[in-house]
Amino acid sequence: MNELIKMIKYFNNKKIVIGVTGSIAAYKAVDLASQLKQRGAIVDVIMTETATKFIHPLSFQAITHREVVVDLYDPSSEIGMDHLVLANQADLFIVAPATANIVSKAALGIADNALISTLLATEAPVLVCPAMDGDMFQKPQIKNNIEKLIEFGFHVLGPNEGRLASGNIGKGRLVEIYEIQNMCRYIFGIKGDYRGKNIVVTSGGTKEHIDPVRYISNNSSGKMGNFIAEAARDRGAFVQLVSSSLSAKSSAGIELKKVKTADQMLRAVELASTSADVLIMAAAVSDWKPIDVSEQKIKKDGQKEISIQMTQSSDILSTVLKPGLFKVGFAAETEDIINNASEKLNSKGLDLIVANDISDDSIGFESDYNSVTIIDKNGIAKQVDRSLKYEVANLILDEVLNLYV
Ligand SMILES: Cc1cc2nc3c(=O)[nH]c(=O)nc-3n(C[C@H](O)[C@H](O)[C@H](O)COP(=O)(O)O)c2cc1C
């Protein structure tokens, strides 16, 4: 993961309580606490007695710089004695890893330790990440109790299938820390200004095959579109990400549709747009595709040159004509940027266009930064100076929301 991206404070000043229970995966909660703190959260940790047999509270204290609560009746602990303090303060409560024991206690309302007493008292959203042996997870009691938690409004993430402590492969492994973070971002987004909006975003450069091993593509990394998808999800949108980018991923609130060619992207965008309010085309769609795709690898066969006949590929933005769909295009230009972008906005019937100068190496394709001009239908242009692509994504989304009716 890129160091610069780590600096984005997705959880700025959010008060997050992590409940840690007696699972072999308890050590992973230290990384979770660290990652959340690095991204701006104020993290408190409550551990069960059993969890302290797996990992010492000092590890969490050193990471969070805050007192760790274990004992509900510890007179020397300021917050331990009043379990309602953390319950009331929390913006989000995560139980990770969650044992079969805590899952069942939470489902039944058994409040016999500091963690579960606080959990049952909080009004904050709760995310439970179960981790246990695969056979334990399959038991109907556990499945029923997890279903009960979902009925009570808890978010449940995982467990994943994979290698378990026993050495067996099964479903019981704690989800990865990045998955927990994505889920947290999704949960915080539920009340965001994009809640209820359905957005289609495209990213990546399409690949147009010449033969089974060769293709024509471009330098787009897909980062800009991927960040727009994440930013929209973080603000509450349901996002369908149609992407040819290798780094694009499905995550909480983002449904990924993988494509390769411009034609595949067109079909996927058309389908996704039927339920969408906004379409943001950040993908670098190939303008040209070979007329004939050789079924066999093209051999040199003594030739010094070959010619490849190309034809125009589908123009996705002009083709998708769903009434009321708010359409945003991107114009990667090397000269006369504003005029070229405005011309594209008008000819494709867009609501907004985002223009950038790809001749500048410090921004654009592979970079985590971008500098863009956002132009609306009335020709009003807003300049966004060099900023992280996640920040640029949010400014584009601000503009969309300003103009969206
Ligand atoms: C080495 C070891 C690993 C364990 N790992 C898990 C686990 O991953 N998940 C689980 O539900 N229980 C696990 N247990 C059993 C729990 O520690 C036990 O059910 C305990 O009562 C849980 O207490 P707590 O929920 O209050 O933390 C493990 C036990 C041992 C000895």
Image (cartoon, rainbow, N blue to C red):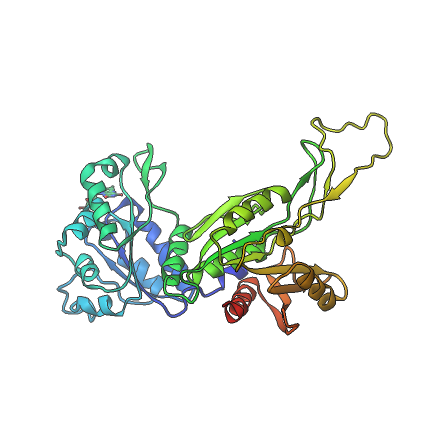
- Residue at x 18%, y 63% (from the top left corner): 121
Question: Between residues 185 and 353, which one lies in front from this camera angle?
Answer: 353
- Residue at x 55%, y 48% (from the top left corner): 270
- Indicate left or right for 325 with 307 as reference: left
Question: Between residues 18 and 352, which one lies in front from this camera angle?
Answer: 352
Quadrant for ligand 1 reads top left
- Residue at x 72%, y 64% (from the top left corner): 343
Residue 241: x and y in percent read 51, 51
- Residue at x 64%, y 67% (from the top left corner): 372
- Indicate left or right for 357 with 244 as reference: right
Q: Say if residue 304 shows up in the picture.
A: yes
Question: Between residues 7 and 198, which one lies in front from this camera angle?
Answer: 198
Q: Is residue 125 above or below residue 151?
A: below
Q: Is residue 109 above or below residue 268?
A: below
- Indicate left or right for 196 with 152 as reference: right
Residue 42: x and y in percent read 35, 67
Residue 246: x and y in percent read 57, 45
Q: Which residue is situated farthest in the front direction here? A: 323
